[in-house]
Image (tube, rainbow, N blue to C red):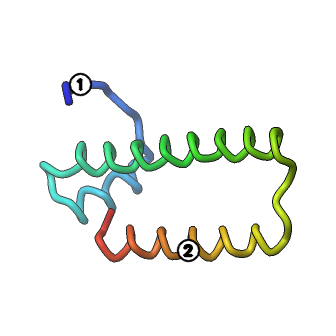
């Protein structure tokens, strides 16, 4: 994937926490992973909205099952430090 340099502004305390965690060379990779994950979540949200428009809202049981699956996915990412 091609890359391009951008400048972003972060709260100083947050930037220092990230820097302490990943080291000076790891901030860009860390921010990239976070932005990629957020973009994936946005796309999934768009898909859910479309599906609900087409097929109706989820039942409470379906919502509970999807919430459990989301927790499992989040746990998987956390365990890998992503």
29 above or below 4? below
Label 2 crowd bin: few (<14), some (14–19), many (20+), radius 10 Å = few
Residues at discs 1 and 2 in contact (Cβ within 8 Å): no
Secondary structure, mark 2, is helix
Q: Which residue is mark 1?
A: 5
User: Which mark, residue 75?
Assistant: none
Q: Residues within 10 Å of mark 1 (few under 14, many from 20)?
A: few
At 56% from the left and 40% from the top, the residue drawn is 43
Q: What residue lies at 39% left-to-right and 73% top-to-bottom?
A: 76
Label located before the other in sequence (1 or 2): 1
> Marks 1 and 2, Cα distance to the nearest angstrom?
33 Å
Spot occupied by residue 34 in the image (x, y as percentages of width and height): 39, 50
Single out the mark in the foreground, 1 or 2. 2
In the image, is residue 64 above or below residue 34?
Answer: below
Image quadrant of residue 19? Answer: bottom left
Q: Nearer the viewer, residue 77 or 27?
A: 77
Q: Nearer the viewer, residue 11 or 18?
A: 18
Q: Which mark is residue 71?
A: 2
Image quadrant holding the N terminus, namely top left
């Amino acid at each position: 994937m091609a890359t391009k340099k951008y400048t972003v502004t972060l709260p100083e305390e947050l930037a220092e926490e990230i820097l302490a965690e990943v080291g000076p060379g790891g901030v860009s990779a860390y921010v990239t992973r976070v932005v990629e994950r957020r973009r994936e979540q946005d796309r999934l949200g768009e898909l859910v909205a479309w599906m609900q428009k087409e097929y109706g809202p989820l039942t409470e049981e379906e919502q509970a099952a999807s919430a459990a699956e989301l927790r499992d996915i989040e746990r998987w990412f956390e365990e890998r430090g992503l």
